Amino acid sequence: MAANADEFGIANRLNEAEYANTLASQFNMLEPENAMKWNPIHPSQDAYNFGPADKLVTFAASHGMRVRGHTLLWHNGNPAWLTNFAKTATPAEMAAVLKSHIDMVMGHYRAQVFAWDVVNEAVSDSATALGTTLRDSIWNNQPGIGGSGTAFIEQAFGWAHEADPTALLFYNDFSIEGGGPKFQAVLTMAKDFVARGVPIHGIGLQMHLNNSGFPSTDALTETMRQITALGLQVHITEMDVRLMLASGTASPADLQLQAQAYQRVLTVCLRNPGCTALQTWGLTDKYSWIPGFFPGFGAALPFDASYQPKIAVAALLDTLRSTPPQLLATSIVNAASYKAGAVAPGELITIFGANYGPGALVGAQLDANGLVASNLAGTQVLFDGVAAPFIYAVSGQVSVVVPYEVAGKQQTVVQYIFNGVKSNTVSIPVAASAPGVFAANATGRGPGLVLNSDYSLNTESAPAAGGSVVQILATGGGAVKGGAANGALAVGAGEQTLAVTVTIGGVNAPVIYAGPAPGLVNGVMQVNAMVPAGLAPGPQPLLITVGGVRSDAGVTIAVK
Ligand code: XIL
């Protein structure tokens, strides 16, 4: 769960203890409501004001919350200097201003904001499925940044991707969640972008709902299905459910309907693995845009103006408890190679798509016994009931070490648990070995995580000489002679039970050592091998075979 939060234009809400406590304890993601919009962050042509947004980003980091960014291109929220500039500017000048803004703002928050609403509300409310109708704006056509149709949106996504290639890029809009012509227009654009390789990763459904018109479970499910079928994620970005107020209060019946709306949206999101975030537009009725924009309405958020949970909160928590994360066997992969299939005792694996977990990445910790902890920030992965040591955990992706107890079994039953909420179980085959060589950049491909004989990292500019001995880091080597304790740090040398061979450039590289990596957690396999002489200089394929099972092709070692 996530909430937007802001302090632009109002007293510093983060200094209000109840606000800060509710935000930090009840949510694991945060989005500045206004502070990253053009007007506050770029108040004059040559000046940026990052202060307020920085405070929110710092708060998020210190409470393990992820941050969404909002927004880089919108017809609203623009500073007066910009709207004046647009009156006489050429499209080329507008394009230059937009590109430098995107560079500056996304650059400032690179690696801190994981997802951006690059473009907000660009499709008009009268859009039809037949022809995408775009809203008039300084960016589209008044004067616009050049190009016709959705070209201005496409350009913004391209610039955003250049500014932060690691950020997830979203198109965000309202009144599209229930389907209909406007949604079809957004979908048509998204389909075209995906087909042509425009860097877009998701659609944001704002979901400013009211108590009578919220979409049915079927309609919402269908919307999410159509978006995720394109390979895009769904974020619910601005949910609130406004209620008609009589003498300032909402009726008990309306509060029930509101709880139902929140519950329905969360249920549909949890059932669709492509729906990866649910965020409310604020957290407390004390601070909400609704009364100002929809006169007569209010009480739209999960917590009331005194920070007391409304029945919507109980409904949301019930849903979280009863709609478990979905685990798929195909999402359980070797942590080095990302290959799915059988797991081996001691193998470091990564599980994708387990969408419950800490909002920000939590790295491995040692427990009271000096073992790598098998409960990390409330997260556990069980293999036949045995808890696996954790390498890291973040909602959507965790990495653990397969317990050695699976050795000798045909299969093992895996289950993921977060704060007591249990996933389904999946049964996956067990193999004696399932080797994967770590890549230096953790992508499963390219230069391997290999140390030269002088302990420098093997790279094209630091290649290994023929006849020298290199250390290769891998996993999935299976059992170790004499046994290995789950989660223990290897103290010294040992030996793999199964035979280990290495080829470099297709030539046998004699193995001098294959066993635990001293100082690292049991399950990481270190292989010392002698680089064959006479290979062509440059990257050469590196393959490890353990007990007759060979690692995947694609990892290399540089030789000179
Ligand atoms: C709203 C804010 O909540 C207000 O404080 C501000 O005055 C106007 O903008 N869709 C969006 C948000 O994408 O940026 C809007 O936020 C609400 C509608």
Image: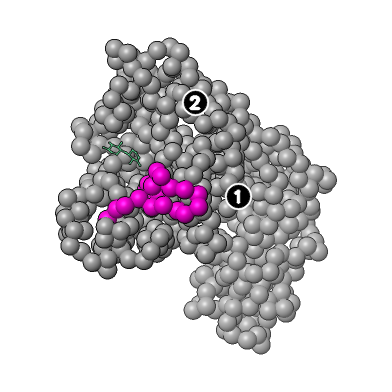
Residues at marks 1 and 2 touching, judged by CB atoms closer than 8 Å: no
In front of the other: 341 or 143:
143
Of the 4 image quadrants, the one containing the C terminus is bottom right
- At which x and y percent is residue 100? 28, 63
Q: On the image, numbered disc 1 is attached to which residue?
A: 229
Q: Is residue 126 magenta?
A: yes
User: Which amino acid does the dot numbered 1 rest on?
Assistant: Ala
Mark 2 sits on what residue?
261
Q: Residue at x 26, y 57 (%)?
A: 142
Q: Mark 2, residues whose alpha carbon is within 10 Å: few (<14), some, or many (≥20)?
A: many
Mark found first going from the N terminus, 1 or 2: 1
Residue 539 in sight here? yes
What stretch of residues is rendered in magenta? 120-138
Reply above or below: 498 against 380: below
Name the residue type under label 2.
Ala
**Image location of residue 546, percent across then percent down:** 76, 62
In which quadrant of the rendered view does residue 247 lie? top left
Q: Quadrant of ligand 1?
A: top left
As drawn, 419 above or below 108: above
The image quarter containing residue 320 is top right
